[in-house]
Structure formats: structure tokens, C-alpha cells
Image (cartoon, rainbow, N blue to C red):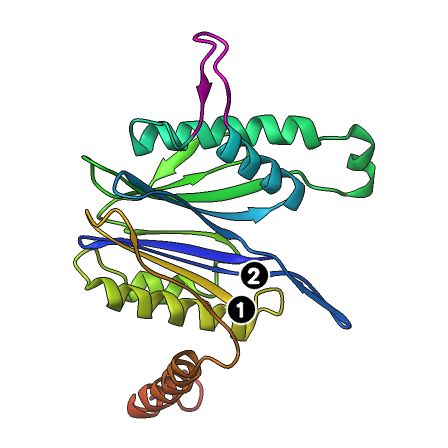
Amino acid sequence: MTYCCGILVRDGLVMIADTRTNAGLDNISTFRKLHVFEQPGERVLMLAAAGNLSVTQGVLNFLKEGFENPETKEIESALTAPTMLKAAQFVGKAVRRARAEAFDPSDQTNGVSFDVTMLLGGQIKGSEPRLFMIYSAGNSIECSQDTNYLQIGEHKYGKPILDRAANYDSDIYDALKIGLISMDSTIKSNLSVGLPIDVALLRKDSMELEVQTRIDAGDEYFRDLRERWSKALRAAHMAIPAPPYRGREK
């Protein structure tokens, strides 16, 4: 019950996440799913999460406090990782630990899922911006220039937009616009995804967020974007010639 996406471009990285956690007829609740960890001038990490909230909270606690490496006896955390790959590996370990602590065998009969999926994006000084998807088992995949975005949650409605428009060479604010259109398309078609939306934009080598904001129902730009996108879609399908198929083939 969420939608998060990250888009990697030559100029940096954009991450967007909704906040809806429940969408019953009389109970709509929200929870922040995009979290930022910064060390000014040294690193910026952005974590988006989909899945079990207690496991997510456990991972966040591990990211803030770290845990002991059984071999070196030193406290490790994502904020001390020397590379983004090591940070992604730490998040994977944190996911496994948080799931183990939250798991209750009796809950399995009640259909409780302890699965989570996470996006970790950011940059550590001296290296390139990178974007990873981390699974419940703790393993991960990395975004590439060929497929320069990753999604978690209710991704199917927003994926066609990213497939057609997301490009590694896109301007970073075009990437933000494409991501917002992808989010709006998901909100339009899926009740379990909704406003407010959290947005973070990291320009390469800046070592600080250029944009960190929350978009709610009163945001003028987002309202204009969704109206323009709807009009553009209607105009596009009207401009395509009618299908030539009439009658039955014999």
C-alpha cells in the first residue's frame, strides 16, 4: 500500500514517495516513507520503504544507531559506510535483523506479512550517485544507465510513464516532472496510494539536497501538472486516426 520511485540521471537523483498506509472507507492514514540521512559535505542517503511498518521502523533505528560487527566488534551504520554499495549491504543486514526481531510465528495464521522492499539512493563524497533496491531477504539490485529508475509498491500504473519518458540523459528537473506524472497516474488508478507526496532531489556532487519538500492536495504546481497531463492524454488519443477495422473478416 504505497508507491515509491527513484530516478537516476547524469545530473543526480530524484526520489518520490507517497505517504498512505491505510485507505478504508472511513479511515485514511499517512506515514512518512521517504527518509533522509545527511552528513553535510560528506554524504546524503535517501531511503524509501514499502511493506511492514514495524520492520521499516526497525531498519530506520538500525540506520540511526548502527549495530556491532561480530568480527571487528565495531559499531557499523550506513553513515559510516565507505561506499554506497556498502551502505546498501548494511541496509540489507538491517532488514534481516529487523524482520527477525519483528517476526512472530503466531501471526502467520493471521496473514501478517513481515516483508519490506526498500530503495536506497544517494552519494558519498568521492563516488558517483547510486540507486539500489533492497529486498526482504537483504539482497539488492542496482539501477543502471540503461534502466535508470527503480520502483517499489504499487508500481504498475506509473511504470509505463517511466518506461517511455525516463532517460539517463534527462535534465534532473525533467526527471522530477516525469516522476510526479508517474505518481499522479498511480494515485488516479489506485486508492491505496495518495497524497501527500514526499520529494527529494540530489544534484551530483552537491552533497546536500537541492529539493526536499512535501506536496499536498493544495499544491498549485501538482494540481496544474495533473490537469495538463489529463488534457494532453485526451488530445493525443483524439489526434490518432480512428481504427480502420469495420465489419468482420471473411
Are discs 1 and 2 less than 8 Å apart at CB? yes
The residue where tag 1 is placed is 196
- Of the two numbered discs 1 and 2 on the same chain, state the one appearing first in sequence: 2
Q: Indicate the quadrant where residue 227 lies.
A: bottom left
Secondary structure of the residue carrying numbered label 1: loop
The residue located at (42%, 84%) in the rendering is: 220
Which numbered marker is on residue 19?
Answer: 2
* Magenta stretch holds residue 210: no
Q: Kindly report the secondary structure that dominates the magenta region of the rendered protein.
A: loop
Residue lying farthest to the front in this orientation = 40
Expressed as whole percent of the image width and height from the top left, the position of residue 249 reads: 41, 83
Expressed as whole percent of the image width and height from the top left, the position of residue 216 reads: 51, 74
Total marks shown come to: 2
Would residue 121 be found to the left or right of residue 66 on screen?
left
The residue located at (39%, 32%) in the rendering is: 79
Residue lying farthest to the top in this orientation = 71
Give the quarter of the figure containing the N terminus. Answer: bottom right
Which numbered marker is on residue 145?
Answer: none
Expressed as whole percent of the image width and height from the top left, the position of residue 97 reads: 59, 26
Secondary structure of the residue carrying numbered label 2: loop
- What stretch of residues is rendered in magenta? 66-77
Seen in the picture, residue 50 relative to 96 is either above or below; the reply is below
User: As shown in the figure, which amino acid type bears the numbered disc 1?
Assistant: Pro
User: As shown in the figure, which amino acid type bears the numbered disc 2?
Assistant: Thr
Seen in the picture, residue 67 relative to 145 is either above or below; the reply is above
Could you say which is closer to the camera, residue 182 or residue 92? 92
* Magenta stretch holds residue 69: yes
